Every structure is written in C-alpha cells, then in structure tokens.
Image (tube, rainbow, N blue to C red):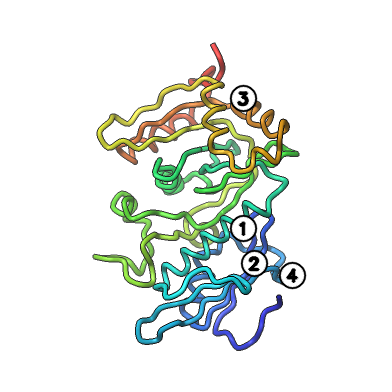
C-alpha cells in the first residue's frame, strides 16, 4: 500500500527488525509527534516502498480523540493522542516479533556498554523498562526495553530501538526524562497513560550497536527489599532466558543451544530492585569492572 496524498503528516520510513512501516495522520501536530517518538526506528532506506501503514484519524473533534488503524485493521477507537501512539508502539512490537524469523527473540531489555551487551530478561512488572531507562540516562547505549533480538548467525544482540515505554508507576523516579509536554502536574492527552520516550539522534539517549552479550541481569522489583545483586549459575540463567523466549519453539534445538551458549559465556545475576539509582550503580559497576566478577554465571 503506497502513501496517499491528503494527509497532514507522514512519518519517515520506519523499521523494527524485519518489519517495515510508516505512520500517517490527519493532524499535523500528532504526525510530527509520531515522527519524533519513533525516530529511533527510522529506516535509512527512506525512499523504499512502505509495507504497512498506521493511520491516525480524528474520531471526535470536540473530544480530540483519535482512531488507530494498521492497513485495513482497526486497532483502537476514540483514543487520546498520546494513547493512540501507545497503540502503534504495541502493534509494532507484535508485528516485529512475528516478522523476525532470523532472530531468537526474548522478552527482555538490553543496553550496550563499551561494545558489550547487558541482557535484562523479565516479565511485565519486573521493572526491566525502568531499569533500562535508568541505565540509558546514565549513558549506556540503548538496544531495547521490550524485545531483545539475538541474531542466530552472528550470536550478537541487535538493536531494536523502539521508544522506551515507561508506566505511570515509574514517572516519579524518571521525572527528568518525561516528555516536555508533561512537565508539571498531570500528563495530558498528548502523553497518555504511558510515556513513549524517543531514543537516538537529538534525544540525548544513545542507541547501541550490534554486540555480544557479556551479562545477564534478571530484575525483580520489591519495594520492601534491599537493592542487591545475587550471582546466578548458568543453569539458573538459562531457565530465566528460556521462560522469557518469545519464539524458541520455531528455532528448535538451534535456539536451545543458542540460549545455552548465552548463559554459559555471560556473567549472570539476579537483581532485586527497590531503589532505581542504587540498581543502576550496581549494573554500572559490573560493566565497568567485569574482571572483578569473573566466574559468575558458570556452574561451580
């Protein structure tokens, strides 16, 4: 489906792993916001035909609500503008997972430090996106906060620089990263119930490059516990990775071996988090002095 004229704004071509798309809107401000929020996914081949179109169209001018569609499929109706963008990000995640057959995908965050990757697997609510945001704020390169992609040919983690999705429970600890339009009380219709924080050029949030993972850090948020790292054996790390694997079954034994190699070569830890700054200091300590932690992640 090619772009049709008559829309107020059309984003650059965008790609999430093997999924190629663009967004169009009948409101110039919303279209520009989509371009800014999704800037980390900008496709260098901007002139290529677009495979999929997300459309943001006004549904009620008085209420300022928006309908969201992908091609001919309705995703949501009557959304506030910021929440409409959240629907686009959600569907791009889903579609990227379905389209990316050459990658072993994990429900995990990822950051890069000096050419070495830190993989942060965890279910929703574990605090992985908040931890990733804190580490990116501290200067590490962003790979993803949701869908980590392990290239099966090279064994490297590949960047999937979708916007960082921050839930309302983390607004306070990441207040300095919040979108400009939400400064002060409340967040308003242009932000939504979640923050979608852009990454890449011009945002102050560096995107990392393809890299080999050197660390696996499995987070668990517990407001009542002390923030602490605990070494994991390779077997424990393998299980944490396997339970968060999105497409392990299609990859069969090759995928299982890839996870085994990952768990075996990485230094692996569980991370109990009650204080974000303290958790970030612990992870930064790992990547700044890896030799001091030698042996963690391997069977005794």
From this view, report whether residue 177 is shown above or below residue 228. below
- Separation of disc 4 and disc 2 at Cα? 10 Å
- Separation of disc 1 and disc 4 at Cα? 19 Å
At numbered mark 3, what does the secondary structure look like: helix, strand or loop? helix
Q: Position of residue 80 (x, y in %)?
A: 39, 73
Q: Residue at x 69, y 36 (%)?
A: 155
Mark 4 or mark 3: whose residue is earlier in sequence: 4
Mark 4 or mark 2: whose residue is earlier in sequence: 2
From this view, report whether residue 186 is shown above or below residue 166. below
Mark 2 or mark 3: whose residue is earlier in sequence: 2
Mark 1 or mark 2: whose residue is earlier in sequence: 2
Mark 1 or mark 3: whose residue is earlier in sequence: 1
Task: Please tell me how crowded label 2 is: few (under 14), some (14-19), or many (20+) other residues with Cα within 10 Å.
Answer: many
Q: Residue at x 41, y 69 (%)?
A: 82
- Separation of disc 2 and disc 3 at Cα? 36 Å
Residue named by callout 4: 48
Q: Position of residue 272 (x, y in %)?
A: 36, 31
- Separation of disc 4 and disc 3 at Cα? 39 Å
Q: Residue at x 40, y 40 (%)?
A: 126
Left or right of 96: which side holds 174? left
- Between disc 4 and disc 2, the foreground one is 2
Pick the quarter of the image with the C terminus.
top right
From this view, report whether residue 230 is shown above or below residue 152. above
As drawn, the label of residue 21 is: 2
Which is nearer the eye, 182 or 203? 182
């Amino acid at each position: 489906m090619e772009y049709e004229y008559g829309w107020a704004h059309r984003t650059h071509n965008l790609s999430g792993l093997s999924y190629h798309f663009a967004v169009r809107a009948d409101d110039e401000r919303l279209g520009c916001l989509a371009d800014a929020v999704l800037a980390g996914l900008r496709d260098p081949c901007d002139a290529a035909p677009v495979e999929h179109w997300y459309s943001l169209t006004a549904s009620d001018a008085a209420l300022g609500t928006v309908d969201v569609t992908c091609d001919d499929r309705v995703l949501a109706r009557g959304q506030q503008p910021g929440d409409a963008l959240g629907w686009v990000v959600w569907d791009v995640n889903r579609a990227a997972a379905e389209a990316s057959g050459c990658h072993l995908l994990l429900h995990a965050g990822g950051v890069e430090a000096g050419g070495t990757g830190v993989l942060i697997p965890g279910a929703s609510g574990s605090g992985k996106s908040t931890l990733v945001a804190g580490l990116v704020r501290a200067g590490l390169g962003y790979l993803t906060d949701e869908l980590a992609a392990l290239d099966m040919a090279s064994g490297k983690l590949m960047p999937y620089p979708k916007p960082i999705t921050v839930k309302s429970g983390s607004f306070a600890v990441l207040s300095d990263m919040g979108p400009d339009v939400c400064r002060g009380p409340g967040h308003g219709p242009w932000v939504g119930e979640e923050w979608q924080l852009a990454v890449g050029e011009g945002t102050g949030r560096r995107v990392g490059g393809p890299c080999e993972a050197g660390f696996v850090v499995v987070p668990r948020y517990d407001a009542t516990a002390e923030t602490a790292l605990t070494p994991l054996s390779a077997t424990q790390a393998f299980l944490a990775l396997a339970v968060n694997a999105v497409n392990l079954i299609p990859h069969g034994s090759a995928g299982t071996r890839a996870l085994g190699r990952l768990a075996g070569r990485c230094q692996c830890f569980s991370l109990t988090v009650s204080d974000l700054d303290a958790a970030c200091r612990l992870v930064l300590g790992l990547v700044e002095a890896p030799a001091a932690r030698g042996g963690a992640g391997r069977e005794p």
